[in-house]
């Protein structure tokens, strides 16, 4: 299935393809404050439609995930990084997808504080 997502002001928009069967709630210092629900898609299934110049990047801890924020509204609708096996991934904030009902997807809790 193809999904479209964006930041709050709409300057950053993207498409991502895949089947969303569950979402992840992470308790790391960033995710617990942000409150996003994440879904991981292969990087080649993610396409930024607009807003590359409107993004700013934040990294912390091991600096392996590039958290992408809109410079204008401050929303992080996605992040880029690698899974533990080295595969390039896009971490999608499901709360930023158009028309997607996050309450219909089971939530798996991740102990990000342990990483």
Image (spheres, rainbow, N blue to C red):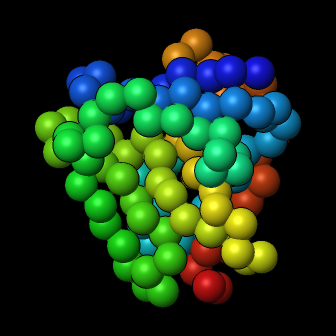
Q: Quadrant of residue 84?
A: bottom right
Above or below — where is 94 with respect to 29?
A: above
Is 47 or 1 nearer to us in this picture?
Answer: 47
Q: Give me the residue at 58% from left, 13% from top.
A: 99
Q: Give me the residue at 64% from left, 57% from top.
A: 89
Position of residue 90 measured from the top left corner of the image (x, y, whole percent): 58, 51
Position of residue 44 measured from the top left corner of the image (x, y, whole percent): 65, 46
Above or below — where is 82 with respect to 80?
A: below
Above or below — where is 61 with respect to 25?
A: below
Is 76 or 16 nearer to us in this picture?
Answer: 16
Which quadrant of the rendered structure holds the C terminus?
bottom right
Above or below — where is 34 with respect to 22?
A: below
Residue closest to the far top: 99
Tally of numbered tags: 0
Is 57 or 103 nearer to us in this picture?
Answer: 57
Asked if one can make out residue 93 in the rendered structure from this viewpoint, the answer is yes
Position of residue 87 measured from the top left corner of the image (x, y, whole percent): 71, 66
- Would residue 95 appear left or right of 84 to someone viewing this image? left
Q: Give me the residue at 53% from left, 42% from top.
A: 93
Q: Give me the residue at 15% from left, 37% from top.
A: 72
Residue closest to the far left: 72
Which quadrant of the rendered structure holds the N terminus?
top right
Position of residue 67 measured from the top left corner of the image (x, y, whole percent): 40, 60
Asked if one can make out residue 37 in the rendered structure from this viewpoint, the answer is no
């Amino acid at each position: 299935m193809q999904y479209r997502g964006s930041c709050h002001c709409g300057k950053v928009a993207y498409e991502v393809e895949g089947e969303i069967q569950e979402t992840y709630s992470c308790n790391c210092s960033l995710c617990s404050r942000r409150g996003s629900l994440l879904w991981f898609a292969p990087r080649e299934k993610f396409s930024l439609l607009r807003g590359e110049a409107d993004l700013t990047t934040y990294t912390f801890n091991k600096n392996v995930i590039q958290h992408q924020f809109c410079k204008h509204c401050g929303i992080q609708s996605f992040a880029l990084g690698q899974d533990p096996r080295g595969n390039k991934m896009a971490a999608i904030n499901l709360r930023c997808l158009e028309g997607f009902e996050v309450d219909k997807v089971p939530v798996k809790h991740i102990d990000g504080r342990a990483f």
